[in-house]
Image (cartoon, rainbow, N blue to C red):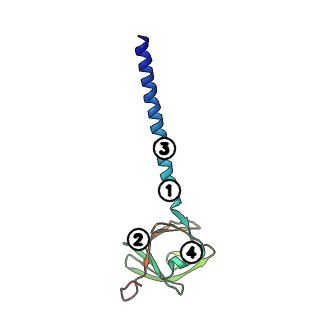
Amino acid sequence: MQKVRLVESKSQFARCLLATLATGIGGLVILDVGFVAAEGVRTLAGAQIRAAFTGKQLTDEVHYRFVYDGDGTLRTYSMGVKQVGKWRIQKDEICLYIKDMGDDCYRVTQSGKRFELKPAGPGGPIDGILEPAYHGDGEKR
């Protein structure tokens, strides 16, 4: 009878050990994936922002696009409404001056093809992908 209990106890111990190891390994895999995702996001400095945005448009590919011309002109197209404003780099932020949106500066982060502009003050972020800007003739450049 003791032999049976000893075998059962070893078997139960082995199952608990395997479950603990599997949980630990699973946790490490999830933790590692989290670090990889976090490493994929980078904050851009002023010169990097200027290089990335000049002559490009930030768009969600459906509702809006922000066109950053090289001379500092900012053209926005949102739900069929066009506005013209200005943009400039100030320290490590991009500042947008648009009449109906108000003026604000944003910290820029990039993850792969996605860019996010996070406001310094209240308000929500602007995010999308950067692509060559459309011009009046409909051509990307």
Circles 3 and 4 in contact, beta carbons < 8 Å:
no
- How far across and down, in percent of the image, does residue 56 sit? 46, 80
- Tell me if mark 4 has few (under 14), some (14-19) or many (20+) residues whose alpha carbon lies within 10 angstroms of its own: few
- Tell me if mark 2 has few (under 14), some (14-19) or many (20+) residues whose alpha carbon lies within 10 angstroms of its own: some
- Tell me if mark 1 has few (under 14), some (14-19) or many (20+) residues whose alpha carbon lies within 10 angstroms of its own: few
First along the sequence among labels 1 and 2: 1
Is residue 87 toward the left or the right of residue 19 in the image? right
Residue bearing the label numbered 1: 36
State which quadrant residue 72 falls in.
bottom right
First along the sequence among labels 2 and 3: 3
CA–CA distance in space, label 2 to label 4:
21 Å
SS of the residue at dot 4?
A: helix
Is residue 77 toward the left or the right of residue 105 in the image? left
- Tell me if mark 3 has few (under 14), some (14-19) or many (20+) residues whose alpha carbon lies within 10 angstroms of its own: few
CA–CA distance in space, label 3 to label 1:
14 Å
Residue bearing the label numbered 4: 48
SS of the residue at dot 2?
A: loop
**What's the residue type where badge 1 is placed?**
Val
CA–CA distance in space, label 2 to label 3:
34 Å
From the image, state whether disc 4 or disc 1 is nearer to you: 1
First along the sequence among labels 3 and 4: 3
First along the sequence among labels 3 and 1: 3
Q: Residue at x 42, y 29 (%)?
A: 15
From the image, state whether disc 2 or disc 3 is nearer to you: 3
SS of the residue at dot 1?
A: helix
Looking at the rendered structure, which numbered label has been put on residue 10?
Answer: none
**What's the residue type where badge 2 is placed?**
Asp
Residue bearing the label numbered 3: 27
Residue bearing the label numbered 2: 60
**What's the residue type where badge 3 is placed?**
Gly
**What's the residue type where badge 4 is placed?**
Gln
Up the image or down, 41 lies above or below 70; here it is above
